[in-house]
């Protein structure tokens, strides 16, 4: 059984919570007690309808203000697959939480209110989906009931949206548009007569069909070492295993590996999972690898395969970053660069530019504040063995950690 | 649809093992918060897998309220013995004796909220910097908001509005002395995922999860296990019935469900057909709409 991760985004009041509520309701994932609690809470708030957003706005502050502040993770299953929805906030001031929720998604679902069409937030969400290179993009044009299910209106919005595509990550890729009404559950899980002019699949059926080819399995092999297992027990006296999750590609028993940064070579003796011996293992799998030679490897080393393109040891990192901290980025200040399990001191050398994400305009700026997205250059104390994000996303990102506050202040995509 | 079609998604196991290894690598003294329930039993299996053939590099910490089901304690001791684990127990009764907390009174008295103080004291005494818990985001709406590495201040408080962004699978466990991190490796699992995992891995679980006959009383439309810890009124007369528990907390805050399910397959079928959520049987969650969030702010796991 596979897991499909979706991020939903949209502007305030475009019906995002209702859509999620509808998906859960129609897949029978809301139990009776939760439904009753929702009805009671809606009544207490003086509403004359059941407010499904109360289902996902889990924090007191969110319910008070009626807005989503932080990501909620929501789950439902069909017999076919398990779905994880990262429900992200729509407000600009929580852009960092949008990026947080979107970072693991295979599908970006953008909602548009049929009455309003494309709004400022649509550009922002589209920009984030492009920046993260989320493989699939689905645009739900919601509240079709409020525009009398007008086909022309729908076509106009689709056309407007397509204007965004040329030159973007989604240029030439399939972008799915679906007319829906979350309030009445039309085209969400079931089809509707009212939108008979739409010949495509309803949202859930479309999600069920998405083939997310694990591209990361075709990329060059990368295995960051998380932990060295040395039991020193009688039974496993000489056992020395390297534990980690394969970031990309595949490894097989007998492969010649190179350990970075020390560039030592050896052959894979075994690949194990809780005592089970595997012949090979692929991206996403947590395994233990043993080698034929006793070479010096510890946490933070990266195993790659001989004969495949190897990542360059970067001393100067050029990256697009999203700044996520209240304190501004300070050029010249050192931050810890965390790339997989490795933490390396780094210094911000230069802010190259900042992008105004709603217009895609690039501006030269000397500072970056909360929610800004821009390009920087970092100098690192030791080489970083990363790939370019566009070539191998699994080995192409990092976070910056403030040494004093310990906060995660930025996420970066290596260019 | 038959439960047999529902398989456990193995990607979730890979993710949980990754999180456990990060915890072992990033912290000095992590511990597994062990209640004897299905989620913490699952954590123990995942930790075995993460470090095999090495031993689990964390002790188990059980905060014993003194109101546990005897079957759970029996199971706990059996598991620890069988797997050769290190178990640390701290008792809520001690916190009561020290005057740090006060026993609740009345019909709904429970030690559930009191255990937070015992937990925080144990963390301070034993200098744990990471506590691994079996909480899942699908359980409750405040939990749905929590990060996998959830930083707590020196008073154990969760600040929901100040959470660190968590991107891709990069986990930032850097903290100051006195703070600690609650780690949730099975955040992305659902109740059904846990049951399917238990079935596929053939894990042993306490007998109270399976249908059995026991004394119960009916209160507020729920079936409460009858025990010396429950303050009953004269009208509340215990009777015997076939029940099981969906979640294992204290005998004073966990309601039973009427059930004939005595096999894992039947339990899974029952959950698939259930109209009531798992925490619908947790009396502790019913105190207010924000009961869980408020407890978490106070340091609850």
Image (cartoon, rainbow, N blue to C red):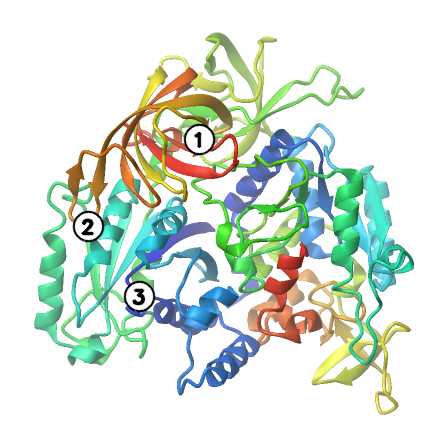
The image position of residue B179, as x and y in percent, is 65, 41
1 or 2: tag closer to the N-terminus = 1
Label 2 marks which chain's residue?
A
Q: Position of residue A133 (x, y in %)?
A: 28, 41
Is A250 or A114 nearer to us in this picture? Answer: A114
Q: Is residue A200 above or below residue B280?
A: above
Q: Residue at x 88, y 90 (%)?
A: B234
Q: Which of the marked residues, 3 or 1, is nearer the chain's N terminus?
A: 3
> Label 1's element?
loop
Q: Name the foreground residue: A310 vs A308.
A: A310
Check contact, mark 2 vs mark 3: CB within 8 A.
no
Q: Which residue is mark 3?
A: A12
> Which residue position is annotated with label 1?
A247
User: Please, what secondary structure does the residue beneath circle 3 have?
Assistant: loop
Q: Which residue is mark 2?
A: A358
Element class at badge 2: loop
Seen at 24% across and 51% down, the residue is: A124
Q: Position of residue A151 (x, y in %)?
A: 11, 72
The reply to whether dot 3 and dot 1 touch (C-beta < 8 Å) is no
Badge 2: residue crowd in 10 Å (few <14, some 14–19, many ≥20) = some
């Amino acid at each position: 059984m596979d897991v499909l991760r979706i991020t939903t985004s949209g502007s305030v009041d475009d019906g995002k919570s209702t859509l999620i509520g509808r998906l859960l309701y129609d897949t029978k994932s809301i139990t009776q007690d939760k439904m009753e609690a929702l009805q009671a809470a809606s009544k207490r708030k003086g509403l004359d309808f059941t407010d499904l957003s109360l289902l996902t706005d889990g924090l007191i502050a969110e319910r008070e203000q009626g807005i989503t502040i932080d990501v909620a993770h929501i789950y439902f299953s069909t017999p076919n697959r398990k779905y994880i929805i990262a429900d992200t906030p729509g407000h600009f001031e929580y852009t960092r939480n949008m990026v947080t929720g979107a970072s693991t998604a295979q599908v970006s679902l953008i909602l548009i209110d049929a009455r309003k069409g494309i709004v400022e937030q649509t550009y922002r969400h589209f920009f984030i989906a492009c920046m993260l290179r989320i493989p699939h993009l689905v645009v739900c044009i919601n509240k079709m009931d409020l525009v009398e299910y007008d086909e022309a209106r729908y076509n106009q919005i689709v056309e407007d949206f397509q204007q965004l595509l040329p030159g973007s990550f989604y240029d030439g890729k399939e972008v799915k548009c679906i007319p829906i009404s979350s309030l009445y559950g039309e085209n969400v899980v079931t089809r509707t007569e009212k939108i008979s002019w739409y010949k495509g699949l309803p949202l859930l059926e479309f999600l069920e069909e998405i083939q997310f080819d694990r591209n990361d399995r075709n990329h060059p092999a990368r295995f960051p070492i998380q932990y060295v297992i040395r039991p020193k027990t009688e039974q496993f006296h000489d056992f020395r295993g390297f534990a980690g999750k394969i970031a990309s590609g595949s490894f097989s028993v007998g492969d010649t590996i190179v350990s970075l940064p020390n560039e030592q070579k050896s052959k894979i003796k075994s690949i194990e999972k809780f005592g089970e011996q595997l012949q090979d293992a692929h991206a996403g799998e947590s395994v233990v690898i043993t080698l034929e030679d006793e070479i010096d490897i510890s946490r933070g080393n990266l195993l790659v395969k001989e004969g495949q393109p190897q990542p360059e040891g970067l001393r100067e990192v050029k990256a697009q970053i999203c700044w996520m901290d209240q304190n501004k980025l300070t050029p010249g200040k050192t931050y810890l660069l965390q790339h997989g399990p490795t933490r390396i001191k780094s210094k911000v050398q230069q802010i190259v530019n900042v992008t105004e994400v709603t217009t895609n305009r690039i501006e030269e700026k000397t500072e970056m504040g909360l929610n800004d997205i821009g390009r920087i250059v970092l100098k690192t104390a030791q080489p970083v063995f990363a790939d370019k994000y566009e070539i191998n996303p699994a080995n192409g990102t990092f976070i910056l950690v403030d040494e004093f506050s310990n906060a995660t202040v930025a996420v970066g995509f290596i260019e | 649809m038959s439960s047999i079609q529902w398989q456990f998604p193995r990607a979730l196991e890979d993710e949980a093992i990754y999180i456990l290894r990060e915890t072992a690598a990033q912290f000095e003294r992590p511990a597994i918060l062990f209640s004897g329930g299905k989620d913490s039993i699952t954590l123990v299996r995942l930790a075995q897998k993460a470090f095999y053939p090495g031993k689990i590099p964390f002790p188990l910490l059980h905060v014993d309220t003194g109101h546990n089901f005897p079957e759970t304690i029996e199971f706990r001791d059996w598991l620890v013995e069988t797997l050769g684990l290190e178990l640390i127990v701290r008792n809520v009764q001690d916190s009561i004796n020290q005057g740090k907390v006060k026993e609740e009174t009345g019909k709904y008295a429970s030690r559930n909220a009191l255990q937070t103080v015992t937990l925080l004291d144990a963390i301070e005494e034993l200098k744990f910097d990471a506590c691994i818990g079996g909480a899942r985001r699908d359980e409750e709406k405040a939990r749905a908001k929590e990060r996998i590495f959830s930083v707590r201040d020196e008073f154990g408080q969760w600040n929901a509005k100040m959470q660190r962004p968590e991107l891709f699978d990069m986990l930032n466990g850097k903290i100051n002395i006195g703070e600690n991190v609650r780690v949730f490796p099975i955040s992305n699992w659902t109740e059904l995922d846990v049951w399917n995992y238990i079935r596929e891995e053939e894990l042993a679980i306490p007998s109270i999860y399976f249908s059995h006959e026991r004394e119960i009383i009916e209160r507020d439309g729920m079936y409460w296990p009858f025990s010396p810890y429950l303050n009953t009124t004269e009208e509340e007369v215990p009777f015997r019935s076939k029940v099981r528990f969906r979640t294992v907390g204290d005998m004073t805050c966990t309601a039973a469900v009427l059930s004939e399910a005595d096999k894992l397959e039947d339990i899974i079928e029952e959950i698939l057909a259930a109209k009531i959520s798992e925490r619908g049987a947790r009396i502790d969650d019913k105190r207010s709409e924000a009961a869980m969030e408020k407890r978490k702010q106070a340091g609850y796991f």
